């Protein structure tokens, strides 16, 4: 099968071709696993963190990618959940132990043995992938393969972030950064919180006008002051500036939810602008989001089909994965980037 692989940690500033297209054997499947012929795989900001070593893969070479849509091509002896040819999705959660306190309390995303697709085990930048059937999901018919891909990470984690804000309908929500996840959160919030106004902070004009097109009431640059204070903010940027600015823009008792697996160090000195009275006092809260549970993915897929939330996608052939990643790194974004595989 064709696959693009990462052989070592590298800097995307210096290396514009971090991934290499190769020919590999199809993965083998165990008794409770399915073999999936990949049709589309979303490109996530986390891939940049993996390539640059902020959340490094355990073994090399590794196939990245964790927003996977494809069709069941083979089933293990005891795999009964899906028929052959059924369309399935695979997300960031590849496995969890199932018996630790986190798993038993519904927080399998926090399991110490959490394994991530495309980082700890092979991902979807390839023609085939194997996965435990319990960690694959049926994809509602309303979506094309490419449209469904970003729902599996950007959408599901956006859903989890929104849930963690504790927002009440009518309260004002801010979004800092307006990439793949934020644009889905905007669509989701307009449905779940129809009386809430949404304020978007993004560094480029293209993202800001896209946010206004999708129904944001205000869009400004990072650091610009919104006309009103906000009850909650979801930050999806890799930087520190938006965190400090978001804290300043919160109402008393407001909550900032940081939806990022890692932050980059580029503007870390921005944190020195943090002043206790303006940014933290008044019972303001900060919460990060870690991973997703299977429940997050299942609930979000159902909701996305019902609303419906159809992601805006930009497609690239698998062989152009490097170009998609570099454009993502450079912030050339409109909606979600997806690799067409099959
Ligand atoms: Zn992701
Ligand atoms: Zn566990």
Image (cartoon, helix red, strand yellow):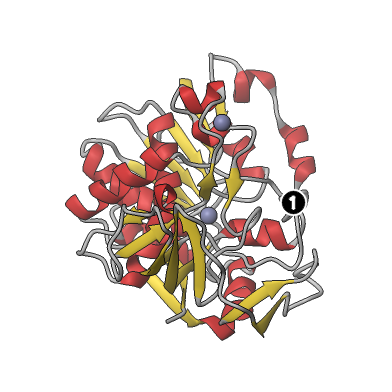
The residue positioned farthest toward the top in the image shown: 282
Name the residue nearer the viewer: 256 or 307. 307
Residue 24: horizontal and vertical position, in percent?
Answer: 64, 80
Residue 309: horizontal and vertical position, in percent?
Answer: 26, 56
Q: Secondary structure at mark 1?
A: loop
Is residue 85 rendered to the left or right of residue 123? left
Q: Is mark 1 within 8 Å of ligand 1?
A: no
Q: Is residue 227 visible?
A: no
Residue under pointer 1: 54
Residue 342: horizontal and vertical position, in percent?
Answer: 42, 82
Q: Quadrant of the N terminus?
A: bottom right
Is residue 157 rendered to the left or right of residue 80? right
**What is the crowding at mark 1: few (fewer than 14 residues within 10 Å), some, or many (at least 20)?**
some
Residue 258: horizontal and vertical position, in percent?
Answer: 56, 38
Name the residue nearer the viewer: 103 or 233. 103
Q: Residue at x 53, y 27 (%)?
A: 99
């Amino acid at each position: 099968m064709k696959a693009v692989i990462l052989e070592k940690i590298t800097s995307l500033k210096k290396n514009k071709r971090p991934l290499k297209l190769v020919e590999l054997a199809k993965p083998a499947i165990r008794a409770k696993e399915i073999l999936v012929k990949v049709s589309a795989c979303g490109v996530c900001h986390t891939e940049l963190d993996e390539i640059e070593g902020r959340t490094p893969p355990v073994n090399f070479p590794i196939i990245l990618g964790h927003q996977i849509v494809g069709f069941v091509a083979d089933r293990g002896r005891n795999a009964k959940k899906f028929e052959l040819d059924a369309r399935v999705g695979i997300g960031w959660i590849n496995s969890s132990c199932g018996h630790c306190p986190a798993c038993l309390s519904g927080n399998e995303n926090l399991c110490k043995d959490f394994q991530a697709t495309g980082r700890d085990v092979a991902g979807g930048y390839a023609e085939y992938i194997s996965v435990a059937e319990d960690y694959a999901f049926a994809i509602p018919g309303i979506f094309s393969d490419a449209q469904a891909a970003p729902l599996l990470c950007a959408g599901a984690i956006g859903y989890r972030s929104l849930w963690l804000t504790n927002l009440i309908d009518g309260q004002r929500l801010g979004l800092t950064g307006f990439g793949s996840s934020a644009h889905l959160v905007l669509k989701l919030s307009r449905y779940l919180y129809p009386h809430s106004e949404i304020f978007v902070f993004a560094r480029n004009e293209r993202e800001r006008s896209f946010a206004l097109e999708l129904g944001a009431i205000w869009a400004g640059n990072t650091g610009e002051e919104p006309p009103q204070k906000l009850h909650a903010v979801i930050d999806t940027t890799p930087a520190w500036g938006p965190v400090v600015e978001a804290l300043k823009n919160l109402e008393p008792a407001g909550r900032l939810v940081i939806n990022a697996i890692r932050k980059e160090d580029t503007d870390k000195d921005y944190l020195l602008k943090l002043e206790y009275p303006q940014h933290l006092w008044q019972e303001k809260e900060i919460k990060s989001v870690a991973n997703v549970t299977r429940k997050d993915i299942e609930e979000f897929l159902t909701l996305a089909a019902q609303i419906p939330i159809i992601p805006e996608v930009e497609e690239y052939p698998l062989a152009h994965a490097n170009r998609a990643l570099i454009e993502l790194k450079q912030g050339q974004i409109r909606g979600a980037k997806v690799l067409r595989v099959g």
